[in-house]
């Protein structure tokens, strides 16, 4: 398999690429959407990219807009969205746009490879409902997304102090 790793965290990309290469896979990296699209189009005639690991939030871009561009360039791509800011609404949107799965950071290479093998919706159903903390995290992410990342506006809508919201956002996403 040929992997394209798109993330603005260069260290993460290089480590993941090395681990994939040790497993016998080929991996190239890109730090933004323009470079990712260039890699995909450059390899259309030779050794096509099969799988893309795409960060949801790059420095200046949304992974969702890059997702659409990549799939337009090569419809057979399998794209996995990887993010540190997970929410149900962005996961649903990513799947609707053509991603095959959606993972939360931190994720290891085993999780990433397994996510390509198990497409979204085919994973085993959870036995228990999400925790209240998880639901709160997802609601905060949804409202923050609706306000285009404006923390002050989000805090006002949620009825909490801006600093309280900032502290909650600095924590890692709550697991189920």
Image (cartoon, grey):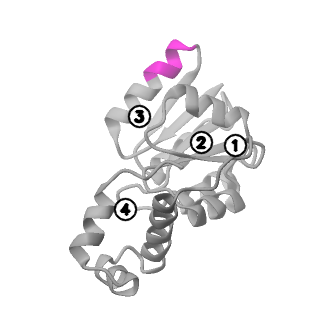
The magenta stretch spans which residues? 18-23
Q: According to the image, label 3 marks what residue?
A: 13
Q: According to the image, label 4 marks what residue?
A: 60
Q: According to the image, label 1 marks what residue?
A: 77
Q: Quick one: SS at disc 4? A: loop
Q: According to the image, label 2 marks what residue?
A: 40
Q: Quick one: SS at disc 3? A: helix
Residue 153 shows which numbered tag?
none
**Mark 2 vs 1, N-terminal side:** 2
Looking at the image, which residue is at 37% across and 46% down? 8
The residues tagged by marks 1 and 4 sit, at their Cα atoms, a distance apart of 23 Å
Foreground: disc 4 or disc 2? 4
Classify residue 118 by image quadrant.
top right
The residues tagged by marks 3 and 2 sit, at their Cα atoms, a distance apart of 17 Å
Foreground: disc 3 or disc 1? 3
| Position of residue 97 in the picture relative to residue 173 (left or right) | right
**Mark 4 vs 2, N-terminal side:** 2
Q: Quick one: SS at disc 1? A: loop
Q: What secondary structure predominates along the stretch shown in magenta?
A: helix
The residues tagged by marks 3 and 4 sit, at their Cα atoms, a distance apart of 17 Å
**Mark 1 vs 4, N-terminal side:** 4
């Amino acid at each position: 398999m040929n992997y394209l790793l798109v993330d603005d965290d260069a260290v993460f990309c290089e480590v993941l690429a090395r681990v994939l290469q040790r497993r016998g896979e080929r991996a190239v990296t890109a730090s933004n959407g323009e470079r990712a699209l260039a890699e995909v189009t450059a390899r259309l005639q030779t050794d096509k990219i099969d799988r893309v690991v795409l960060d949801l939030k790059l420095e200046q871009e949304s992974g969702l807009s890059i997702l659409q561009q990549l799939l337009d360039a090569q419809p057979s791509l399998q794209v996995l969205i990887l993010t540190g800011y997970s929410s149900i609404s962005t996961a649903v949107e990513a799947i609707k746009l053509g991603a095959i799965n959606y993972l939360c950071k931190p994720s290891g290479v085993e999780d990433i490879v397994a996510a390509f093998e198990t497409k979204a919706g085919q994973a085993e159903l959870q036995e228990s409902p999400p925790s209240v903390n998880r639901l709160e995290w997802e609601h905060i992410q949804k409202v923050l997304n609706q306000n285009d990342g404006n923390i002050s506006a989000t805090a006002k809508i949620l009825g909490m102090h801006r600093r309280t919201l900032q502290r909650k956002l600095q924590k890692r996403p709550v697991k189920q």
